[in-house]
Amino acid sequence: MRTALVVGILIGLAIGLAYAWLIDPVELGSADPYHLDARYRDVWIVMSAEAYAADGDWTRTSVRLDWLRDPNLKQTIVALFDRVNADGPNPQARALARLAAQLGETTASMVVYLTTPAVTPTPRLTPISILPSLTPAAPAPTATDSFPTPTPTSTPTPEFTLVSRDSVCESGPPQIRVTVQDLAGNGLPGVDVWITWDNGADRFVTGLKPEFGAGYGDFDMQPGISYRVGAGTQVALALVSNLRADECPGGRLSWNVVLRPVP
C-alpha cells in the first residue's frame, strides 16, 4: 500500500514536470510600464519628469506617460508630488510640478516651484595676474589744477522691510518663523529668505508649508548662535539680527518675524 502511494506520487510528479517543461513551458517576455508595481510606476513618472526638465522634449515625455495607461494620470502625478515634496524642497518635486503644470494641473504647493527659478551654482572666477604697464609719470599738480570730486557710493535699497519681530518662550525646538506679506498684508509665496550667522548661511522659500500660510517658512535654531534674517536677492543685507535661542523659564526663545516689500 505504501509502495503504491510512493509510486503514484512519483508518476504524478513526472507527468507535471513533463507538461511544464515540454508541452506548455513558460515563455518569458519584456513587461510594459503599465505592468509594473505601483512603486516602480512612480519611479517611471519621476524619471520622465526629470528628463522633461532636462531636455524640454514634451513629445517624448508624453509618449513615456502614455505607456502607463493611467486614466487618472493627473491625480497620480499630484499625489506623487505631495509625497516627494513632504521631505522639503528638492529637484524631483520641482520636476513633478513642471510636469503637472504641462498637463494643466497645478496646486498651491506647486506654485512655489513654478514661480521661482531653479538655483544654479555661481561659477567661480579664477583671478588673473596682470602686470602693470610702464607709463610716463604724470606731472605734479599746480595750484590752478582742479581735483575731481569723489562720487559717494550708494547703499543698495532693500527689497523688503521689517514689520514686526516677536520672541516666544517654548518647550519645543527653537525656530525662526518668517512670514512674508504683500503690501496688502496677504501671504507672499515664492520669496527667498536667507538665514545667516558667523561662518554659515541657509535659505528657504516661503509657501512650502501652506497649512501655516502662503507666505510662511521656518528655520531650526541652535543654542549659542546669533542669527540674521534677510529676504530677496540681497543675501548680505540683514533686515533682522541678533536672534538667539536663549534659555527662558519655559524652554528656549523662538522668533516670529514679519516682512513686507519696500513700497
Image (cartoon, rainbow, N blue to C red):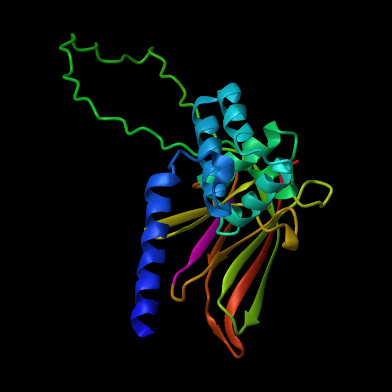
In the image shown, does 154 or 124 lie closer to the viewer? 124
Who's the residue at 17% across and 13% down the image? 133
Who's the residue at 74% across and 53% down the image? 214
Q: Position of residue 201 (x, y in %)?
A: 45, 55
Relative to 253, 111 lies left or right: right
Q: How many marks?
A: 0
Which secondary structure dominates the residues rendered in magenta?
strand
**Which residue is at the far top?**
136
Q: Position of residue 150 (x, y in %)?
A: 46, 26
Q: Position of residue 183 (x, y in %)?
A: 80, 46
Who's the residue at 61% across and 34% down the image? 65
The boundaries of the magenta stretch are 225-230
Q: Is residue 153 above or below residue 90?
A: above
In the image shown, does 211 or 247 lie closer to the viewer? 211
The quarter in which the C terminus is drawn is top right
Relative to 126, 51 lies left or right: right
